[in-house]
Image: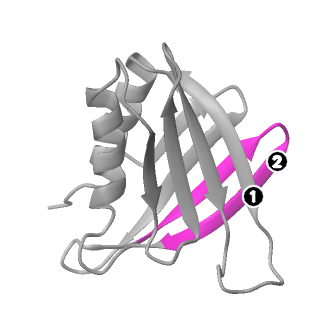
Amino acid sequence: MSQVVVGQDGHALILRDVVRGSGGEIWSVDVEVVHTGLRAELTVASHYAVGFDDLVESFAGMAENWRGWDGDQVYESVEHDLRIVGQHLGSRVRIGVDLYPQASDLDGWRVQAAFTVDAGEQLSTAAHDLTALLGPHL
């Protein structure tokens, strides 16, 4: 698996180009947001202890509870430069993405985008593909 696309038709979150250490641990992943002609990309560092397990678990939890959940399902990267929020809307799930390099820098850029995916197959595929991309690499 070389990349994961969550979304479609020019409105998507794309994760690719995983960098791993010699022991297979994930150091970073490139994240791109595409939305209505906008493209923003950032390399996001993994958490030293859990890699991107919490991101994988967030999408797995949404896929498992595809019929609905209360509140927001939130993932935030260790450096706070990527935030993903899943909201259940019946047969659809709204995926909100906030991409913000150098979160402590006031003179930077920030991209916020939102799009919907099918609560069934699209969400399940995204969860499966994220597991393949960001899971253990033996």
Q: Quadrant of residue 21?
A: bottom left
Of circles 1 and 2, which is in front? Answer: 1
* Vertical position of residue 138 compared to residue 49: above or below: above
Residue at image position (18%, 78%) is 23
Extreme-top residue of the structure: 91
Where residue 72 sits: x, y (%)?
Answer: 46, 42
The part of the chain drawn in magenta is 28-44
Residue topped by disc 2: 38
Q: Amino acid at mark 1?
A: Val
For the image, the number of numbered tags is: 2
The reply, left or right, for residue 116 in relation to residue 124 is right
Residue 11 badge:
none
Judge by depth and name the residue closer to the eye, 113 or 4. 113
Q: Secondary structure at mark 1?
A: strand
| Mark 1 vs 2: CB contact within 8 A | yes
Where is the N terminus found, in terms of image quarters?
A: top left
Instruction: Decide whether residue 42 is among the magenta residues.
Output: yes
**What scheme was used to colour the molecule?**
one colour
Label 2 Cα neighbours within 10 Å, binned few <14 / some 14-19 / many ≥20: few
Q: Quadrant of residue 111?
A: bottom right
Where residue 33 sits: x, y (%)?
Answer: 67, 50
Q: Earlier in the sequence, mark 1 or mark 2?
A: 2
Q: Amino acid at mark 2?
A: Leu
Residue at image position (47%, 47%) is 3
Judge by depth and name the residue closer to the eye, 81 or 2. 81
The reply, left or right, for residue 78 in relation to residue 40 is left
Q: CA distance from mark 1 to mark 2?
A: 9 Å
Label 1 Cα neighbours within 10 Å, binned few <14 / some 14-19 / many ≥20: some
Where residue 90 sits: x, y (%)?
Answer: 49, 15
Where is the C terminus found, in terms of image quarters?
A: bottom left
Residue topped by disc 1: 111
Residue at image position (52%, 39%) is 5
